[in-house]
Image: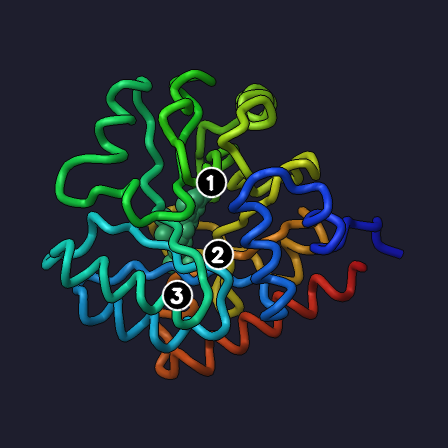
Amino acid sequence: AEEKRLTYEQKLENANHHFSKKILEIAIEKKSNLIASADVLTTKELLDFAEKVGPNIVALKTHIDILTDFDFDETVLPLKDLATKYNFLLMEDRKFADIGNTQELQFSNGIYKISSWADLVTSQVIGGETSLDCFLNVGVIAIIGMSSKGTLTSSDYREEALKIAQNHPNVIGGVSQNKIPDDLLLFTPGVNLETKDDNKGQQYNTPEHVFKNLQTDFIIVGRGIYKANDVEKATLEYKIAGWNAYMNLI
Ligand code: BMP
């Protein structure tokens, strides 16, 4: 028998942060633990993608600085409308990694003005606990461990990173390829049903593997969905695979 895990309902009861509650509520309502990563190059592709995946995801993860034609009004406003229409969160995978003052500037300024639209942001914790103070009104997902080959996120690093994540009220969860304490939500990228690597250092596991072995809460899928010939079909495949993998453990 598998080790028991907390259900999304139990995690919701324990949740303190607005956005940990929100993402768990969406998961329960949509029966989905899927986050789609929209690593596309144009606003049109991003919005088309959001329209297709929107009904079946809990969050859309962006790397907003990849877009070649970013325009606040033409990119962010329609994206926010789609997030409202289909009830998903916007997670900007910025992976902040600087001192508090610089992160504060990067979070709210420049052309992206991340703080004005993101619900969730990723951040390294390399700058120490105080560096996370600037992330008000969003849920921070701390990078605990990375999925790429040769990453420096050793078990010692992860242990120290977890202490920061658990102590900081802005942090709702962590990105990791290892189990983390269940007062934090676990987000796991490096998920693909078809392939084990990408020849650029990425390492993939299946949804089943990451639920069973890591008791993850949310799977993050990029190329498995946005490169698929039929994006809607692929979204459903990952959604169902993720949900079944979770249901098998509760
Ligand atoms: P893909 O499924 O195409 O490999 O995309 C994975 C996504 O998750 C990318 O956007 C990447 O930046 C992100 N990611 C990752 O792959 N590994 C990590 O450890 C942390 C990430 O944010």
Report whether residue 156 is seen: no
The structure residue drawn at horizontal position 45% and vertical position 62%, both measured from the top left corner, is 88
The structure residue drawn at horizontal position 46% and vertical position 66%, both measured from the top left corner, is 87
Q: Amino acid at mark 1?
A: Gly
Q: Where residue 81 sits in the image (x, y, percent)?
A: 31, 66
Q: Amino acid at mark 3?
A: Thr
Q: Mark 3 or mark 2, which is nearer to you?
A: 3
Q: Mark 3 falls on what kind of element?
A: helix
Q: Mark 2 falls on what kind of element?
A: strand
Quadrant of the frame with the N terminus: bottom right
Cα distance, mark 3 to mark 2? Answer: 20 Å
Cα distance, mark 1 to mark 2? Answer: 16 Å
Q: Nearer the viewer, residue 131 or 67?
A: 131
Q: Is mark 1 within 8 Å of ligand 1?
A: no
Mark sitting earlier along the chain (3/1)? 3
Q: Amino acid at mark 2?
A: Ile
Disc 3 marks which residue?
84
Disc 1 marks which residue?
139
Quadrant of the frame with the C terminus: bottom right
